[in-house]
Amino acid sequence: MDMKPEELLHPTGKGLYCPPGDFYVDPVSRVDRAVITHGHADHARAGHRHVLATQATLDIMKVRYGDEFALSWQAAPYGTRQSINGVTITLVPAGHVLGSAQAVIEQGGTRIVVSGDYKRRHDPTCPPFEPVSCDIFISEATFGLPVFIHPPDTDELNKLLQSLQTFPDRTHLVGAYALGKAQRIICSLRALGYDAPVFIHGALEKLCTLYTEHGIDLGPIPLAKSVSKEDLRGQIVVAPPSALNDRWSRRLADPLTVFASGWMRVRARAKQRRVELPLIISDHADWEELTTTLKDVDPGALWVTHGREDALVHYAQTQGYAAKPLNLVGYEEDDDASVLDKGVAAE
């Protein structure tokens, strides 16, 4: 390792900055040149002069911010080496949502991998996370505590299907973040044999359409507003979390509130929103996935961006890795958690 890692990439008030390449990774404010790991709003902001990302992430940004989300942009297919002012950038799958990527940054014999947000379990809507050996691995730690162990998705979704049988006269209103979680739940239900229409809130329509344009088969997903209240009895409706206790839900037949989030492990969060059926489903790595990834990547050192940094740093140090928290600000610990805590819409 010829170049010191901090010379290649270090934290600033705007985000992770690469001085020799003069670019930022997931900057929290407008910059001249940004590398974007995925389309969630806390990582992908509008107004940069130039954006490098996967095509799917660029398409997501267009849907969310309009065609002029940046002055210019460049699509980088997975696994292709790009050069920015002599610094090599390669995007590899992160397994978080459609288009999500890790940023592999190399120069002067030093390789740093910025994970962005990621998970290790199967997701039918995006390619799986690919471990990349490196000098520095920069990881999130949203669920960086040993208590956060996510159960298999099938176990959680079977609870939903069982509830449909138990309460056939109630609409099952599933709160799920509009980008990634909603589409993953729909696809996973199809894999379990649920072939009935899954009704959706209008706020999900554009992103669901984008997913289908990228080859993700969601099956029939009519808008909930297109049918009567009576027709929604015994049906599944997927909506942004803000709709769970909103006036919009009054159009549903005796709605049974369901919320899909890793934070449903914390009972107080479910009670806070009066969730009747909490489902522990997250697009972020749980504790076992975080620690397994550390071993799989086996980096020279671990830097932790946001979340429960201290526990993951301590664990890494007990395993013989140099590790430190970066304490980056401007990134939500979980997209759904921000809705629960602040009471604002995800869309």
Image (spheres, helix red, strand yellow):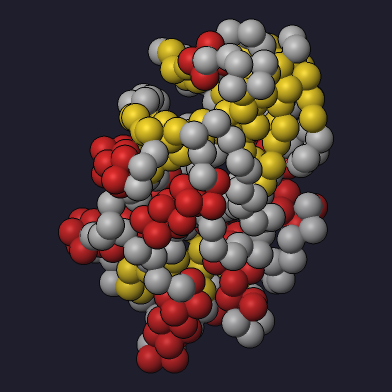
Residue 138: x and y in percent read: 48, 33
216 left or right of 167 in image: right
User: Up-down: is 4 above or below 52?
Assistant: above
Can the viewer see residue 238? Answer: yes
Residue 135: x and y in percent read: 55, 31
235 left or right of 167 in image: right
User: Which residue is situated farthest in the bottom direction here?
Assistant: 166
In-front residue for pair 344/131 = 131
Residue positioned 42% across, 75% down in the render: 156
Q: Quadrant of residue 263?
A: bottom left
172 left or right of 54 in image: left
Residue positioned 60% across, 16% down in the render: 2
Could you tell me how many numbered marks the image carries? 0
286 left or right of 300 in image: left
Can the viewer see residue 169? Answer: no
Residue positioned 39% across, 65% down in the render: 150
In-front residue for pair 113/94 = 113
Indicate the quadrant containing the N terminus: top left, top right, bottom left or bottom right. top right
Residue 47: x and y in percent read: 61, 16
User: Up-down: is 244 above or below 15?
Assistant: below
Residue positioned 64% across, 76% down in the render: 190
Residue 246: x and y in percent read: 35, 54
In-front residue for pair 333/268 = 333
User: Up-down: is 325 above or below 319?
Assistant: above
Q: Quadrant of residue 272?
A: bottom left
